[in-house]
Amino acid sequence: MAESAPHASVGRPPLRRVFLECTSTRESRYNTGIQRAGRNLVNESVGVPGPWRCTPIFYNGRHLEEVDELPLRAAPWVQRANSTDLLRRAFHRVRDRVLRVIPGEAAGEVLHSQQLEYSLRRAVHGTHNALRLLRSLGRPTSKRIEFEAHDVLVLLDPAWTVDLSRELQRARAAGAEVWVVVNDLIPIVHPELAPEGSPILMDKWLRRVLPHTSAMLGISRTVADELRVHLARIADSVPRIDYFYLGAGLDGDELESLRLAEVERACDSSGGTVYLIVGTLEPRKNHPLILDAFDRLWAEGVNTRLVIFGRLGWRSDALARRIRTHREFGRRLFWFEAGSDMELDYAYRHVTALVVASRCEGFGLPLVEAMQYGLPVLASDIPVFREIGSDYPMYFDLEEPGRLEATIERFDEAITAGMTVRQAPRRWLTWAESARMLLDKVTREAGEELQSSTKRS
């Protein structure tokens, strides 16, 4: 059980107890995007000095309790998909076969419906939650977090599949504030670019947590603005909405690599340029657009390479087959499905440029990571990249055919002419600074209220 907050010294407010809920991050084996951000924020928050005491917590199936093993770590070299991924891919294969046997618009609409996918996801996650509950029966109830007035509970994870309503209600009844971090609204704003079923999952999650929410935080101003617009449509009362920024920096403690020699060979630029993609293979990341551009460049005889770091995501099986069966695979086209931070660090230091062609994002972690290395960035012209990258990237219009290809050709021509295209590194927030920004946001207003009440008493 977490300790009570210490009494305030004369004229000094007491430390705020901040609880970071990180159930999904704690359980995830992946080392991409949201998972990397969650782990870094949790690991750094516990050591950031300030008028708070930070405690990572997770939902064990019955109640919230303190995480007992820190720092949180990924298993970056495990390439096997988890059970949910395997079931989803199996369903998609069966669905494709059924539609080949029973073609028709009506059958396609039913088998591709959001409601069907949502129902399947709900069944799978329901099984996981039941197992979580069974495992929790052997854990002592004394580990349960007992909330107090002026505590702050931060839902750091996108816990769409876990119903925390009872715990949120218990926290609010004790006088604690509840803050919800929102990574993006892509499933709702761009449902065609999100996994089937996830728009319903996210909508239900938002409606479930809203009645217990004191305030919300987007991971960028773009997300916060979209959140205000959306909540104004669905809620009678909109909570306070603010934003903070994620940090950048790879894990310096992760010094192992199973395939560094392979990464070194892939990123060898002695014979030409090398371009890097970092991100899960999924529709909104737009990998096919980039691969199409490189196919044309290779057909024209341009000596360039493309290196992909990212696990196989949803609705990308055809893309995966295209990559693995490509005539340049292993020669000028490389794909690392699971990689350590050490391997990614090497890639950032040795490739020619990063390419990000996303149609939408909540932040853009690879962009700020590349900025720290002084690595040139070719980026799709979307609002959040303009917000985060400002004038650092070279932007290209996704709707203008051939624009990316032309940009790559200009880069190659500059290097052939002997020009230096590496840029001066641009500083970004460290993960510790990002954690401080988060903690400052969630404690500032309530801290001022607490200090005022202390003075009045």
Image: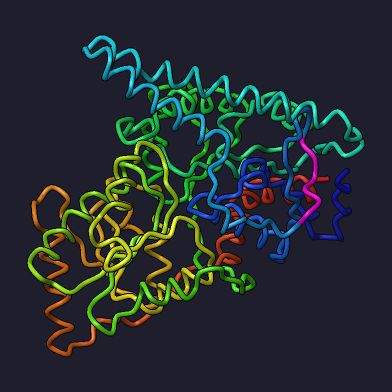
Classify the position of the C terminus by image quarter. Answer: top right
Q: Is residue 233 left or right of residue 432?
A: left
Classify the position of the N terminus by image quarter. Answer: top right
Q: Is residue 68 magenta?
A: yes
Residue in the image at 62% along x and 56% along y: 74
Q: Quadrant of residue 453?
A: top right
Q: Is residue 441 magenta?
A: no
Nearer to the camera, 189 or 256 = 256
Q: Which residues are magenta?
A: 64-69
Q: What is the x, y in percent for residue 45?
A: 67, 59
Q: Is residue 113 left or right of residue 154?
A: left
Residue in the image at 37% along x and 79% along y: 350
Nearer to the camera, 343 or 424 = 343
Residue in the image at 44% along x and 71% along y: 262
Q: Is residue 65 above or below residue 254?
A: above
Q: Is residue 202 above or below residue 301?
A: above
Residue in the image at 88% along x and 47% along y: 4
